[in-house]
Amino acid sequence: MSSTNKTEKLGLNSWIESDTPKRADFNYDNEVIDRAVSEHTENTEIHITQDERECWNNNMHIGMYYGNGATSRVINTECPFDISFGIIFANNRPIAVTKFTDARDYNYLGFISEFCNSLGIELKENKRSFSVTQSSTPAVSGEHTYFNESGLAYAYVLFR
């Protein structure tokens, strides 16, 4: 004989003193609880998956490369997400150097984004790599892009 009473939410057995519990009653209750917990924890509308958790917690990627002096090159970042914004800068260099004697600027800091870029840096179509330039002549109005100077270390910080 199952219980005289049942719980309100799951309909589990709720015995009174005169009831005689049976093993089948306990097994039934366990199945109901197991089913309810499984349905709840597997519901991705109210719980996030491990992939979603990692995605939300992994919003930044940091890396570096060494300049090789080439006029242009692509930096493959091994970034695990599509880049929406990034900062590229030379190690141990100022943001820019201005030589007033010949009215030239040498830029060592730049930005990339989905929508626009600093002069000399461009986000590639795959959104996981970018190209940099090293100009020996001014790119625009005395501006030189110095994002690939031979032997110089460059760092980048990329954001989801």
Image: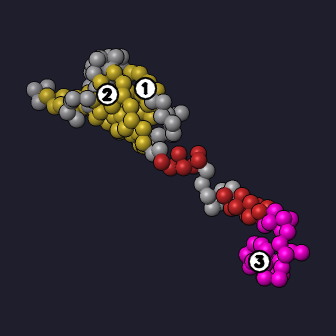
Q: Secondary structure at mark 1?
A: strand
Q: Amino acid at mark 1?
A: Ile
Question: Pointer 1: what residue?
Answer: 75
Q: CA distance from mark 1 to mark 2?
A: 11 Å
| Residue span colored magenta | 1-29
Relative placement, left or right, of 67 versus 106 is right
Q: Secondary structure at mark 2?
A: strand
Question: Pointer 3: what residue?
Answer: 14
116 falls in the magenta region? no
Colour scheme of the picture: secondary structure
Point out which mark residue 154 bears.
2
Q: Position of residue 53 (x, y in %)?
A: 54, 49
Q: Is residue 53 visible?
A: yes
Residue at 77 percent across and 77 percent down: it is 14
Q: Secondary structure at mark 3?
A: strand
Q: Tell me, yes or no, whether the two marked residues, 3 and 1, touch with CB atoms within 8 Å.
A: no
Q: Position of residue 143 (x, y in %)?
A: 25, 30
Q: Which residue is nearer to you in this view: 120 or 9?
A: 9
Task: Point out the image quarter for the N terminus.
Answer: bottom right
The quadrant where residue 100 appears: top left
Q: CA distance from mark 3 to mark 1?
A: 66 Å
Q: Amino acid at mark 2?
A: Tyr
Q: CA distance from mark 2 to mark 3?
A: 69 Å
Q: Which residue is nearer to you in this view: 78 or 16?
A: 16
The quadrant where residue 45 appears: bottom right
Callout 2: 10 Å neighbours few (<14), some, many (20+)? many
Mark 2 or mark 3, earlier in chain? 3
